[in-house]
Image (tube, grey):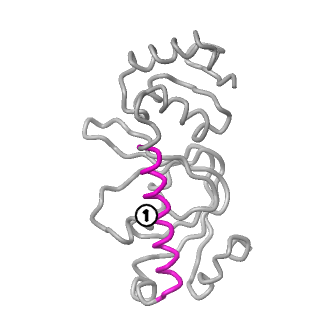
Amino acid sequence: MYVKKYGLDFLKIYPLHLYAFATHELINEKLNPRRFLLFLVSGTVRIYSPRSNGSLNQITRSEAPCCLGDMEFTNPDMKQFLIETVTPCEFVCLDIIMNRSQIENDPKMLLFLLHSVSHKTIEMTQIQAETTDIESRVLYYLERESSNHEIRGVSQLSQHLNCSRRQLQRVLKKMQEEKIIIKKNRGIYVKTR
């Protein structure tokens, strides 16, 4: 069903498995992106990069359809990202280890993986180019990353935006004064326009 729905017909030649996850589950605990190509076919995930001090930096938020494990497939030695479900999710999974030779000789699959990796690279480049100051990063987050255009938790957002909590609080206060956002509750801000 999902293979056809998302135009993934080239996957029909591979043995596939469907996995379902509840909200706020870590995918890596059950499906390692170094071992599987994970095709997110329903739901939303957040992808984090672990920092050397043990904290997490949110890299992106992805909605179905998307492919996870593509970067690991092309570069198996890269640092592993953590994947957490934001909503209930379903994945169509392909075992890389069992099918590597076939994948490496499948032009349709390789073209798909190239497109997926290049899309992620372009997206990250645009985010960095568009969001140089903290206020721009906050606006970008509210408009493109937060599903309901709100901030929940200043500490978590400061980690995601790579700034200090104090810097973020100053920017949030300024944005409130300019009526760009309103504070609904402690640590909860909503975009007004």
Decide whether the magenta segment is chiefly helix, strand or loop.
Answer: helix
Count the marks.
1
Q: Residue 93: name its quadrant.
A: bottom right
Q: Residue 3: name its quadrant.
A: bottom right
Residue at horizontal 37 percent and vertical 32 percent from the top: 162
Q: Residue 117: name its quadrant.
A: bottom left
- Coordinates of residue 144 in the picture (x, y in percent): 59, 41
Q: Which residues are magenta?
A: 106-128
Q: Amino acid at mark 1?
A: Pro
Q: Residues within 10 Å of mark 1 (few under 14, many from 20)?
A: many
Residue at horizontal 50 percent and vertical 55 percent from the top: 27
Q: Nearer the viewer, residue 168 or 122?
A: 122
- Coordinates of residue 55 in the picture (x, y in percent): 34, 35
Q: Nearer the viewer, residue 104 or 24?
A: 104
Does the stretch in magenta take in 107? yes
Find numbered disc 1 in the image and state the secondary structure of the residue it sits on.
Answer: loop
Residue at horizontal 51 percent and vertical 12 percent from the top: 173
Q: Which residue is mark 1?
A: 33
Residue at horizontal 66 percent and vertical 50 percent from the top: 88
Q: Quadrant of the C terminus?
A: top right
Q: Nearer the viewer, residue 172 or 74?
A: 172
Q: Relative to 8, does residue 39 appear above or below in the rendering?
A: above
- Coordinates of residue 179 in the picture (x, y in percent): 63, 14
Does the stretch in magenta take in 149? no
Q: Quadrant of the N terminus?
A: bottom right
